[in-house]
Image (spheres, rainbow, N blue to C red):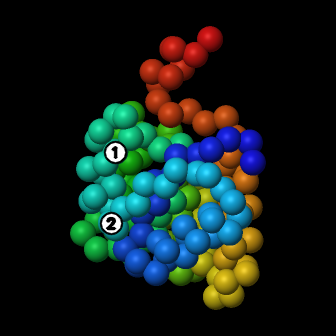
Amino acid sequence: MSKILKILFIEDDTIELMKFNRILELLKYQHNVIECHNGFDAIQILTVESIIPDIIILDLNMPKVNGIEFLTLLKNDERLKYIPAIILTTSNNPKDIYECYKIGIAGYIVKPLKYDDYVKKIQKTLEYWSLNELIINENSLCTES
């Protein structure tokens, strides 16, 4: 692992939240996870500038503000649009995949049925993003030397 990530994990299913956290423990990752149960709550969290995540992992099918609606709001916000958003969902519907990439996601992962396959997908995803140089916002470009 190259660096500890601040991850905004948006998922309405408590079991999926527990599974994600269990995988982080299993893999001994020290990432900081901020949990939200829907896109509306996530937008509220993101309005607080000190809580800008390195990456966002979200489900598509959620109450209040679904994944597509959340992504549209995210990518239309000048301060937040550069945050990589990765879809983690059960939907393999080509329309969903196309719509998400059209909005500007960084990746689309279909949740596998087998737990071991799920662990491998999460591991590879987090390893990949922990190696990337991430832009949090435009202000960070001006303060770095």
In the image: residue 33, left or right of residue 39:
right
Disc 2 element: loop
| Residue 73 visible in this rendered orientation of the protein | yes
Residue receiving disc 2: 38
Q: How many angstroms separate mark 1 from mark 2 (CA)?
A: 13 Å
Outermost residue, bottom direction?
113
Q: 57 or 24: which is nearer to us?
A: 24
Q: Position of residue 24 (x, y in %)?
A: 62, 64
Number of marks in the image?
Answer: 2
Looking at numbered disc 2 in the image, what kind of residue is underneath it? Asn
Q: 25 or 110: which is nearer to us?
A: 25
Residue 19's label in the rendered image is none
Q: Position of residue 13 (x, y in %)?
A: 40, 78
Residue 46's label in the rendered image is 1
Residue at x 67% of width, y 49% of height: 129
Mark with earlier residue (1, 2): 2
Residue at x 74% of width, y 42% of height: 2
Q: Position of residue 27 (x, y in %)?
A: 71, 64
Residue at x 63% of width, y 70% of height: 23
Residue at x 59% of width, y 46% of height: 5
| Residue 68 visible in this rendered orientation of the protein | no
Disc 1 element: helix
Q: Quadrant of the C terminus?
A: top right
In the image: residue 23, left or right of residue 101:
right
Q: Residues within 10 Å of mark 2 (few under 14, many from 20)?
A: many
Residues under numbered marks 1 and 2 in contact, where contact means CB atoms less than 8 Å apart: no
In the image: residue 75, left or right of residue 130:
left
Which quadrant of the figure has residue 121? bottom right
Q: 38 or 21: which is nearer to us?
A: 21
> In this rendering, is residue 118 above or below 41?
below
Looking at numbered disc 1 in the image, what kind of residue is underneath it? Leu
